[in-house]
Amino acid sequence: MPWTVSLLQILWTAGPVTLLGAWGGYLLGYGKAPTAENYIFFISYTVITGAAGIIANLAHNLAGGRKAERTALKIERVISSLPELLLVTRNLIVESLEGDARRREAAAMLLRKQDLSPEGVELAAIELLDDRDSARVIAQIEIYRRVGLQARIRDLMGLYQDTLDPSLPSWPK
């Protein structure tokens, strides 16, 4: 908390809050209003303890507060760089492969994305099947799947079954 806020809290507490509390407590305890000496005591007590609180807060900020701030900044930097590191890691995995293995791994990475568009599904199918026509049918099926049109999916599966069966041995019949 900034020291200005702490100072305002002390002034508020040492001023009206202390005066009301001292007056009410003294009146309840002794049946009469407190004397000027009692008010000075309560206000002085509040100022001294408040000042001790500000000093303790400053000591904390100087000793450990800055370290916590630096740690938070480091954590924020790491979190903000995670997406880029993920992309670099994926690329390194694909880069380490050759030929068909590279294409299959790239397609598998695409298909692992939960928010992959129908065009992404089509691209993955092209990479895996090396057949643009079959990939286009698979993308169409994905579009209909997303909107729950199972009847239209069955139509396409029936219409293109001969084309897709050789490419997809586990194709639903």
Image: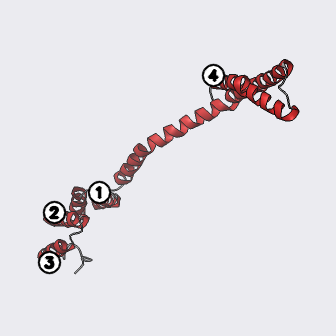
**Amino acid found under the numbered disc labelled 3:** Gly
- How packed mark 3 is, by other alpha carbons closer than 10 Å (few <14, some 14-19, many 20 or more), is few
The kind of secondary structure element at disc 1 is loop
- Looking at this view, is 9 or 81 the one in front? 9
Query: What residue is disc 1 on?
Result: 116
Instruction: Report the mark closest to the observer, 4 or 1.
Output: 4
Disc on the earlier residue, 4 or 2: 4
Query: What residue is disc 2 on?
Result: 136
Query: What residue is disc 3 on?
Result: 158
Query: If the image is split into quadrants, where does the N terminus sit?
Result: top right
Give how far apart the Cα atoms at labels 2 and 3 are. Answer: 15 Å
Q: Hey, which quadrant is residue 68 in on the image?
A: top right
Residue 126 image point, x, y percent: 20, 61
The kind of secondary structure element at disc 4 is helix
Is 172 above or below relative to 86?
Answer: below
Q: Which of the numbered marks, if any, corresponds to residue 4?
A: 4
At 50% from the left edge and 41% from the top edge, which residue is drawn? 78
Q: How is the image coloured?
A: secondary structure
Instruction: Report the mark closest to the observer, 3 or 4.
Output: 4
Give how far apart the Cα atoms at labels 4 and 2 are. Answer: 66 Å
Is 113 above or below relative to 15?
Answer: below
**Amino acid found under the numbered disc labelled 4:** Thr
Q: Which of the numbered marks, if any, corresponds to residue 151?
A: none
At 45% from the left edge and 41% from the top edge, which residue is drawn? 81
Residue contact at pointers 1 and 2, CB within 8 angstroms? no
**Amino acid found under the numbered disc labelled 2:** Arg
- How packed mark 1 is, by other alpha carbons closer than 10 Å (few <14, some 14-19, many 20 or more), is few
Seen as rendered, the residue at the extreme right is 30
70 left or right, relative to 17 = left
Give how far apart the Cα atoms at labels 4 and 1 are. Answer: 52 Å
